[in-house]
Amino acid sequence: MLRRDTNRGRPSRCRRLYGLLSLTALALGGCASEPPTIDELHATAMQSVGAVEPTLVAFRHDLHRYPELAGAEVRTAGKVTESLTKLGFDVRTGVGGHGVVATLVGDPDGPLIAFRADMDAVAGDALDPVPYASEVDGAHHICGHDIHTTIGVGIAHGLASIGDALPGRVMLVFQPSEEAGTGAELMLDDAVFGNTKPDAIFAVHAAPFPVGQMAVLPDGMMAGRMLVDVRVSGEGDLGSAVNEIREALMQADTVGMEQILAFQTEPFISINLFGQADDSDGNAAVRGFVMSAGLDYRPYVEQRIRSALDDLSFDGLQMQYSFKQALEGVNNDAAMLSRANAAIAAMAPSVSVSPVPGVIPAFSEDFGSFQRSVPGVMYMLGIDNPQAGTVGFPHSPDFVADDGAIRVGVDAMIAVILDAMQR
C-alpha cells in the first residue's frame, strides 16, 4: 500500500496521533520515522468501531423503533447530527429537506471521498417481528435504511478515531426521501457538495444475502425508471385508442409482470402502466414506468418505445408523447468498483464480495442521481441470518435485518474510503 506523510511538520500532532493509533513503531521520545499505512489506519479505525459496536446497535434499534417517512426525517436527522457533531465533524443540516452532510478533514490536500446513507422509512403496517419493533403507526424500516444510517455513523466513529492521520477528506451524506425517489435530486439542487465535488461516492443497500457477504455489479446494478406519458385528443374513439396504446407499449415489454421481482441476467425492458387518467379537458392519457438497467441501454429502450408509438394512427385523433427519467437507478463505475473490491479483499478479508445474480426490474434507487455528478459504487449488503432463519428481502412484510450487518458494512466502507484517499 502507498504511504503518505500526513504529519506535515507538526511534531506535537504527530506524537498525539501516533499515541492514538497505538502503533508499535514509535521512536522513543518522538515520532515514528514513517506515517501509518492505510492498512494500519483501517485496523485502528475498526478497533474503535469494535469498542462502540453495542452503541451502534442501540442506535440502529432506536431508529427502527421511531421510523420517519420520506420528508419527515426530523428526529432521525437530529440523532445523526448529534452523533457526528460530538465526533468532531463539520455538520450541515437541512440540506434538501432534512438531509445532513458531515465533513471530516485529515489531509486538506487529499481527495474528498463521500459515503451516502438514506434515512427514511417505508409506509405501511408490516409485521416487524423484532423486539425493537416500530412504535409509529404506518411507518416501518423494512428497506434497511436504519442499517444504512447506522453504518454511516459507524464510519464516522472509525474515521474520527484516526483524525488528522486521514490521507484526505471524508463527506458523509445522510439523505432524506429516498422512498419517494426525490431525496438525491433535492440534495443536489440544494448544493449538497458545496463548492467541491467529491472524487468518489460510495453506498450500501440492504439485500437478501447472508451477513458477511456483499454483492455488486459494474454499470447498471439497479434499474432506472423512465416515465412515459402519452396523450390523445380529438373527436375519435378515445377508449379504443387508449387500448391500442397500452397494447403497443406492453408489446415492448421483455419481462412480464410475473418476472419483475426476479433477477434478470440479460438487458431488459419492463413496463408498468398506471390506471387510465383522463385530463381536465376530456383527453385520454396513458402513463407508466419503463424500467431498464444500464446507461448504454437507455437510447435503445427509448427508441423501441418511440417505434411502438409511431406505428399507431387513429382517425380524428392526435397523439403526443413525452419521456422523463424519473429514477436514475444505480450505475456503478467499473474501474472504481474494481479498485474498491481489491481494497475490501486486502483490508477486510472477512467480507466476501461476489457478483449480484442480476438486476431486479421492480427495484430502483435514486443513488444514481449522485453518480450522475460523481463517479461512485453502491454495494448490496447481506443482512440475512441463516441461523436465525431471517430473510431480509426489502419491502417484504416479514423483513428482518440482522445487526451483524452493521460491522460488515462499516469494515468494508472504511477500507474503500481509505483506499480511495490514496489516489
Image (cartoon, rainbow, N blue to C red):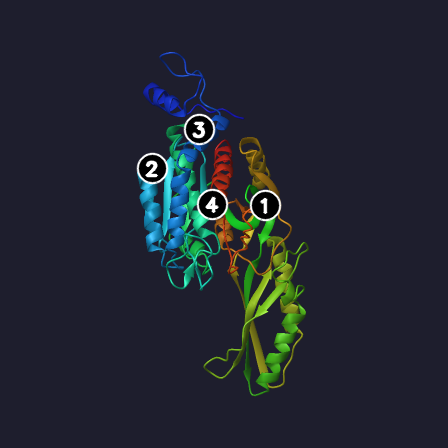
What residue is rendered at 38% in x and 54% in y?
65
* Circle 3 residue: 44
- In this rendering, the label closer to the viewer, 4 or 3: 4
Q: Point out the frontmost of discs 4 and 1.
A: 4
Q: Position of residue 352 (x, y in %)?
A: 59, 39
Instruction: Kindly report the distance in space between the C-alpha atoms of the residues bearing marks 2 and 1.
Output: 30 Å
The label on residue 215 is 1
**Of all residues shown, which one is farthest toward the top?**
28
Measure how far apart labels 2 and 3 are at the Cα level. 16 Å
- Residue 267, percent across and down? 66, 56
Instruction: Please state which of the two labelled residues, at mark 4 or mark 2, is closer to the viewer.
Output: 4
Q: Are marks 1 and 3 in contact (CB under 8 Å)?
A: no
Q: Are the residues at dot 4 and dot 1 in contact (C-beta closer than 8 Å)? A: no
Q: Secondary structure at mark 1?
A: strand
Q: Secondary structure at mark 3?
A: helix
Contact, mark 2 vs mark 3 (Cβ under 8 Å): no
User: Of the numbered discs in the image, which one, if any, rests on residue 332?
Assistant: none
> Hey, what amino acid is under mark 1?
Ala
Query: Where is mark 4, residue-wise?
Result: 403
Q: Are marks 4 and 2 in contact (CB under 8 Å)?
A: no
